[in-house]
Amino acid sequence: QVQLVESGGGLVQAGGSLNLSCAVSGTIVSNRVADWYRQAPGKQREFVATLTPTGITDYAHSVEGRFTISRDNAKNTVFLQMNDLKSEDTAIYYCSITFEHTYWGQGTQVTVSS
Protein backbone atom coordinates (compact mmCIF):
# COMPACT_ATOMS: atom_id res chain seq x y z
CA GLN A 1 0.00 0.00 0.00
CA VAL A 2 1.49 3.32 -1.10
CA GLN A 3 1.19 6.19 1.38
CA LEU A 4 2.43 9.76 1.21
CA VAL A 5 2.55 12.08 4.22
CA GLU A 6 3.37 15.76 3.74
CA SER A 7 4.67 18.04 6.47
CA GLY A 8 6.47 21.32 6.89
CA GLY A 9 3.74 23.77 5.99
CA GLY A 10 2.87 26.77 8.10
CA LEU A 11 2.55 30.53 8.27
CA VAL A 12 5.46 32.61 6.99
CA GLN A 13 6.00 36.23 6.04
CA ALA A 14 6.57 37.24 2.46
CA GLY A 15 10.23 36.75 1.54
CA GLY A 16 10.58 33.87 3.95
CA SER A 17 11.30 30.18 3.36
CA LEU A 18 9.75 26.81 4.09
CA ASN A 19 10.90 23.27 3.37
CA LEU A 20 8.09 20.80 2.73
CA SER A 21 8.62 17.06 3.19
CA CYS A 22 6.77 14.12 1.69
CA ALA A 23 7.50 10.82 3.41
CA VAL A 24 6.71 7.89 1.13
CA SER A 25 6.02 4.29 2.07
CA GLY A 26 5.04 1.28 -0.01
CA THR A 27 7.30 2.10 -2.95
CA ILE A 28 10.87 3.26 -3.59
CA VAL A 29 10.71 6.97 -4.33
CA SER A 30 13.96 7.01 -6.32
CA ASN A 31 12.34 4.71 -8.91
CA ARG A 32 9.27 6.93 -9.42
CA VAL A 33 8.28 10.29 -10.79
CA ALA A 34 7.56 12.60 -7.86
CA ASP A 35 5.60 15.83 -8.16
CA TRP A 36 4.42 18.70 -6.04
CA TYR A 37 1.11 20.40 -6.79
CA ARG A 38 -0.79 23.13 -5.00
CA GLN A 39 -4.35 24.32 -4.74
CA ALA A 40 -5.27 27.83 -3.70
CA PRO A 41 -8.77 28.69 -2.40
CA GLY A 42 -11.25 28.80 -5.25
CA LYS A 43 -8.70 27.63 -7.81
CA GLN A 44 -7.86 24.37 -9.52
CA ARG A 45 -4.94 22.26 -8.40
CA GLU A 46 -1.83 23.29 -10.34
CA PHE A 47 1.54 21.77 -11.06
CA VAL A 48 4.51 23.10 -9.10
CA ALA A 49 7.52 20.82 -9.64
CA THR A 50 8.56 17.38 -10.82
CA LEU A 51 11.54 15.08 -10.23
CA THR A 52 12.21 12.02 -12.38
CA PRO A 53 14.09 8.85 -11.36
CA THR A 54 17.08 10.09 -13.38
CA GLY A 55 17.14 13.39 -11.52
CA ILE A 56 15.58 15.61 -14.14
CA THR A 57 13.57 18.47 -12.65
CA ASP A 58 11.02 20.86 -14.04
CA TYR A 59 9.12 23.73 -12.46
CA ALA A 60 6.11 25.91 -13.04
CA HIS A 61 7.17 29.27 -14.40
CA SER A 62 5.75 31.02 -11.34
CA VAL A 63 8.14 29.23 -8.94
CA GLU A 64 11.23 28.69 -11.10
CA GLY A 65 14.33 30.05 -9.41
CA ARG A 66 12.64 30.14 -6.00
CA PHE A 67 11.59 26.50 -5.37
CA THR A 68 13.75 23.38 -5.48
CA ILE A 69 12.50 19.78 -5.56
CA SER A 70 14.80 17.06 -4.26
CA ARG A 71 14.74 13.64 -2.61
CA ASP A 72 16.59 11.75 0.07
CA ASN A 73 16.79 8.13 -1.05
CA ALA A 74 17.83 6.86 2.37
CA LYS A 75 14.76 8.47 3.94
CA ASN A 76 12.50 7.69 0.97
CA THR A 77 11.37 11.30 1.17
CA VAL A 78 10.76 14.07 -1.36
CA PHE A 79 11.31 17.71 -0.45
CA LEU A 80 10.24 21.09 -1.76
CA GLN A 81 12.47 23.93 -0.63
CA MET A 82 10.57 27.19 -1.07
CA ASN A 83 12.44 30.49 -0.88
CA ASP A 84 11.40 34.10 -1.38
CA LEU A 85 7.79 33.18 -0.73
CA LYS A 86 5.04 35.45 -2.01
CA SER A 87 1.42 35.87 -0.97
CA GLU A 88 0.36 34.17 -4.20
CA ASP A 89 2.16 31.00 -3.04
CA THR A 90 -0.52 30.55 -0.36
CA ALA A 91 -2.16 27.17 -1.00
CA ILE A 92 -2.45 23.59 0.13
CA TYR A 93 0.58 21.73 -1.20
CA TYR A 94 0.30 18.10 -2.25
CA CYS A 95 2.95 15.62 -3.24
CA SER A 96 2.28 12.77 -5.64
CA ILE A 97 4.02 9.64 -6.88
CA THR A 98 3.14 8.19 -10.26
CA PHE A 99 3.60 4.62 -11.47
CA GLU A 100 0.67 2.79 -13.03
CA HIS A 101 -1.47 5.06 -10.85
CA THR A 102 -1.05 8.47 -9.22
CA TYR A 103 -0.91 8.44 -5.44
CA TRP A 104 -1.52 11.62 -3.42
CA GLY A 105 -0.80 12.78 0.07
CA GLN A 106 -3.27 14.63 2.27
CA GLY A 107 -1.67 18.02 1.72
CA THR A 108 -0.02 20.62 3.92
CA GLN A 109 -1.16 24.24 4.24
CA VAL A 110 1.22 27.04 3.33
CA THR A 111 0.15 30.58 4.19
CA VAL A 112 2.28 33.56 3.20
CA SER A 113 1.43 36.87 4.82
CA SER A 114 2.26 40.10 3.02
Image: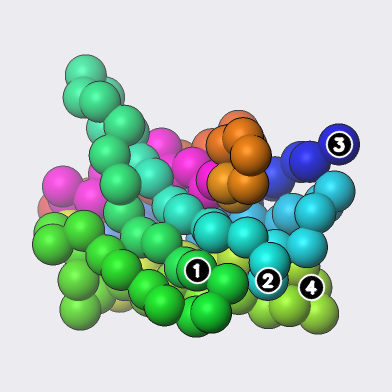
**Quick check: marks 1 and 2 in contact, CB under 8 Å?**
no
The tag on residue 30 is 2
Q: Which amino acid does label 2 sit on?
A: Ser
Q: Mark 4 or 1 closer to N-term?
A: 1
> Badge 1 local density, few (<14 within 10 Å), some, or many (20+)?
some
Asked if the residues shown at circle 4 and circle 1 are in contact, with their CB atoms under 8 angstroms apart, the answer is no
As helix, strand or loop, the secondary structure at mark 1 comes to: loop
Q: Mark 1 points at which residue?
A: 52
Mark 4 touches mark 2? (CB < 8 Å): no
The kind of residue on which mark 1 rests is Thr
For the residues labelled 4 and 3, the Cα–Cα distance comes to 17 Å
Disc 3: which residue: 1
Residue 77, given in percent of the width and then of the height, sits at 69, 66
Report the amino acid beneath label 4.
Lys
Q: How far apart are marks 4 and 1 (CA)?
A: 17 Å
Q: Where is residue 76 in the image (x, y as percent from the top left)?
A: 76, 67
Is residue 93 covered in magenta?
A: yes
Q: Which of marks 1 and 2 is nearer the N terminus?
A: 2
Which of the two labelled residues, at mark 2 and mark 3, occupies the earlier sequence position? Answer: 3
Is residue 14 among the parts visible in the rendering?
A: no
Of marks 4 and 2, the one in the foreground: 2
> What's drawn in magenta, residue-wise?
87-96
